Image (cartoon, rainbow, N blue to C red):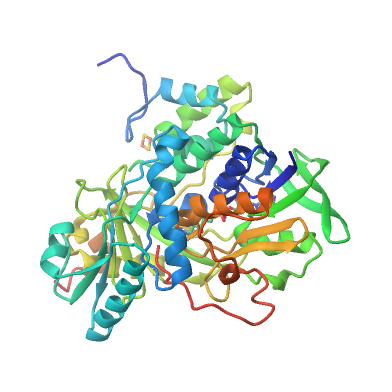
Amino acid sequence: MSGKKIVCRCNDVTVEDVEALIDSGVTDIEELKRLLRIGMGPCQGRTCIPIVLSILARKTGRRQEEIPLPRARVPIRPVRVEVIVGGADE
Amino acid sequence: MSKIAVIGGGIIGVATAYELAKLGEDVILFEKNYFGSGSTFRCATGIRAQFTDEANIRLMKHSVERWEGLEEELGSDIVFRQTGYLFLATSEEEVEAFKANIRLQNKFGVPTRLIDMDEAREIVPILNTEPFLAGAWNPKDGKANPFKTLFAYLFRARELGVDARGHTEVIGFERAGDAITAVKFRSNGKVESVRVDAVLNAANAWAPLINEMAGLSRGLVPITAYKHQLVKTEPLEPGQVEPLVCPPSWNDAYIIQDGEDGGIICGAGIEHKARSLEDYEPTYDFLRGVLEYAVRIAPPLRYAHVVRQWAGFYAKTPDSNPAIGKLLENFYIAAGFSGHGFMMAPAVAQAMAELISKGRSRVPLDWEWYDPYRFERGELRSSAFQIG
Ligand SMILES: Cc1cc2nc3c(=O)[nH]c(=O)nc-3n(C[C@H](O)[C@H](O)[C@H](O)COP(=O)(O)OP(=O)(O)OC[C@H]3O[C@@H](n4cnc5c(N)ncnc54)[C@H](O)[C@@H]3O)c2cc1C
Ligand code: FES
């Protein structure tokens, strides 16, 4: 372990990455999500979004409940392409 | 120095605000939601000069040249990569059409060439070469990260003094004769107004509503919002589908590998008229339809997992070419970009800023072709080639 605190395991984002971006003025969860790719990994943010919300609340002096959650995307879990298109032709 | 209001915090509005500030103007930029929340953050990342008409080819040739220097100019990594576009023909007639397009593109310095399926397979190792007769290949086309590109422009714009306001909605204008004199806006429930010398409507799918606020009819620039969707797979090893690959006759279906995380983005011309300008709900018929095309283009995709699907708007004019130009004495528009606003942004932003600030531009933008009054005159252009 390098001692870095990981926020998003899917996309390897650290607490420092999140804090630095908030310090540079990006305080919108949707914007943080896209610049850092938090919440865009296979787990769809189940691990990282709550952590980022708490960092954001702490750094901006807001209550966590005041911060809207980013829009959830389908599918909730990864689905194999062949399950959707069927397996026949090939 | 003039006070210029830019409405819309998508790539067009943000890049134009930056270009205006570079020319020394005092710019205020309004975005009603978060920056990029319109079409920009939903795009497929593709950038190409392979069009089928002179106006779009020349504009995109210039735009690609701007893209090439953008990382250095803006001082940050926007993941711009010239990984090419590969169009695939399924019939002899299409091969002939490709040849004619290539001649036109070559005439304006775009180095597209016809390639055979062996070469195509070298470029895209997982390609199913069987259904295709030939490919149109331009290695200078490419892709970039829309999130990073928009923020690179936004950060530089702010450094140059642009007053960029997110979560601030424009709700009306004051107009004297043919000129807009002030912009009214609302943020956190508070209404304010600012006196302006000029206004740019860069609200894309929402542009007709802004025109209406300026006292013009909504139908003057008849932009409709079509829901266009994308599906993305888990990351694959880089190099599987680097270019955008598209057989146009298969409903404009395409696949392209995300330059950053390696996931394959899959799109197709399966469209739905949006129920409202908030209708971002993805649909199952799109998911199934697009994946059927994707596995026909690259069969191994069958074994990948889908991780995301999302929807956004193709803000479409009747001829799928944007409306760019002047609507009133000091009221301008750059909107209705269909599937091409991201790739066109560096060129359009520069042209628009020069027009507003100096009355003319050095950019090879054919103002006649994109004239926003053409619809009123019933004068449509030949439809711009649609895909990503
Ligand atoms: C699925 C999909 C794939 C695409 N793929 C590609 C591609 O590969 N390559 C490409 O070049 N293009 C692509 N596009 C098209 C591209 O995304 C758009 O053309 C481009 O983003 C348009 O940028 P814009 O700035 O004009 O509009 P937008 O990004 O839509 O910005 C307009 C902004 O105006 C704001 N706004 C509206 N009303 C108001 C108001 N009253 N006050 C303040 N703000 C307001 C909106 O909130 C919005 O953020 C794709 C689009 C979609 C949907
Ligand atoms: S931990 Fe961030 S998306 Fe999975």
In this rendered view, identify the residue nearer to me: B328 or B249.
B328
Residue B347 visible, this orientation:
yes
Coordinates of residue B190 in the picture (x, y in percent): 81, 39
Residue B277 visible, this orientation:
no
Q: So how many labels did they put on this image?
A: 0
Coordinates of residue B211 in the picture (x, y in percent): 73, 62
Coordinates of residue A70 in the picture (x, y in percent): 52, 42
Coordinates of residue B236 in the picture (x, y in percent): 22, 48
Q: Quadrant of residue B166?
A: top right
Q: Quadrant of residue B265?
A: bottom left
Q: Residue furthest right?
A: B176
Q: Which quadrant of the rendered structure holds the C terminus of chain B? A: bottom left
Q: In this rendering, would B183 be left or right of B205?
A: right
Please tell me in which quarter of the rendered image ligand 1 is found: bottom right
Q: Residue furthest top?
A: A3
B26 over B142 or under it: above or below: above
Question: Residue sitting at 39 percent across and 33 percent down?
Answer: A47
Question: Residue sitting at 32 percent across and 30 percent down?
Answer: A12
Q: Residue furthest bottom?
A: B93
Q: In this rendering, would B388 be left or right of B177?
A: left
B130 over B190 or under it: above or below: below
Q: In this rendering, would B217 be left or right of B233?
A: right
B120 over B153 or under it: above or below: below
Q: Which quadrant of the rendered structure holds the N terminus of chain B? A: top right
In this rendered view, identify the residue nearer to me: B88 or B96.
B96
Question: Residue sitting at 58 percent across and 43 percent down?
Answer: B19
Q: Quadrant of residue B247?
A: bottom left
In this rendered view, identify the residue nearer to me: B37 or B135.
B135
Question: Residue sitting at 57 percent across and 61 percent down?
Answer: B279
